[in-house]
Image: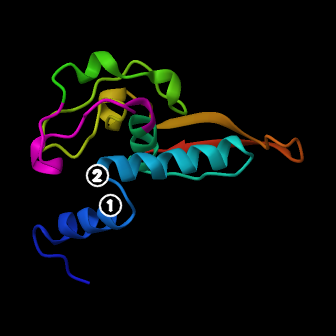
């Protein structure tokens, strides 16, 4: 389905209203909280790209208006970056939110490889640990930037 400008916003606003939320951001927070509860209860979550930071941001910004007026009709809290509760998130701490609506990034959590000064090849190991104690798995990984 091709989304024309404004249609996605209207669809999300209608869904928020239908499900009993006054704002789209409150509906999205509820989704992030359900995902958190699933993971804390032993569920597995695989997330890529902006999903990883958007989950943490949504959870850590609970009770703080971080959406500018073009997204939800009222201005963001100008002190939002001082009100983030990082302990509510999954993994990230100490980041600042982006307030530039023309920037793809939501925060400074993610940055591009040149800014991180990554070597051409990076070795590290990953661990998959089930919270219910059933499975433990460790593997080595080599990433090559091309």
Q: Is residue 124 above or below residue 96?
A: below
In the rendered image, which residue does mark 2 sit on? 22
Point out the stretch of residues depicted in magenta. Answer: 59-76
Number of the label disc, if any, that sits on residue 16: 1
Q: Position of residue 54 (x, y in %)?
A: 39, 43
Seen in the picture, residue 120 relative to 15 is either above or below; the reply is: above
- 101 lies left or right of 115: left
Residues at discs 2 and 1 in contact (Cβ within 8 Å) = yes
Indicate left or right for 61 with 88 as reference: left
Q: Secondary structure at mark 2?
A: loop
Give the camera-side residue of 47 and 68: 68
Assess disc 2: are there few (<14), some (14-19) or many (≥20) residues with their C-alpha within 10 Å of its C-alpha: few
Which label is found at residue 44? none
The residue at 10%/48% (across/down) is: 70
Q: Answer with left or right where residue 63 lies relative to residue 12.
A: right
**Rendering quarter of residue 75:** top left
Number of numbered tags placed on the structure image? 2
- How many angstroms separate mark 2 from mark 1 (CA)? 7 Å
Outermost residue on the front side: it is: 20
Asked if residue 75 is among those painted magenta in the image, a careful observer would answer yes
Residue 145 percent across, percent down from the top left: 43, 45
The quarter of the picture where the N terminus appears is bottom left
Q: Residues within 10 Å of mark 1 (few under 14, many from 20)?
A: some
Residue depicted at 26% across the width and 68% down the height: 14
Which residue occupies the foreground of this view, 1 or 47?
A: 1
Q: State yes or no: residue 124 in magenta.
A: no
Q: Residue at x 39, y 18 (%)?
A: 94
Q: Nearer the viewer, residue 74 or 78?
A: 74
Secondary structure mostly seen in magenta is loop
Q: Residue at x 27, y 21 (%)?
A: 81
Give whichever of discs 2 and 1 has the lower sequence position.
1
């Amino acid at each position: 389905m091709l989304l024309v400008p404004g249609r996605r916003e209207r669809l999300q606003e209608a869904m928020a209203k239908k499900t009993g939320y006054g704002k789209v951001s409150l509906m999205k927070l509820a989704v992030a909280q359900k995902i958190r509860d699933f993971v804390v209860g032993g569920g597995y979550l695989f997330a890529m790209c902006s999903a990883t930071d958007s989950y943490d941001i949504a959870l850590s910004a609970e009770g703080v208006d971080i959406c500018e007026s073009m997204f939800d009709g009222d201005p963001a809290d100008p002190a939002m970056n001082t009100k983030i509760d990082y302990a509510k998130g999954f993994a990230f701490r100490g980041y600042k939110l982006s307030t530039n609506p023309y920037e793809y990034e939501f925060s400074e959590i993610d940055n591009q490889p040149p800014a991180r000064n990554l070597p051409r090849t990076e070795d590290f190991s990953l661990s998959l640990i089930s919270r219910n104690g059933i499975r433990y798995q460790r593997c080595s990984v080599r990433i090559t930037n091309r």
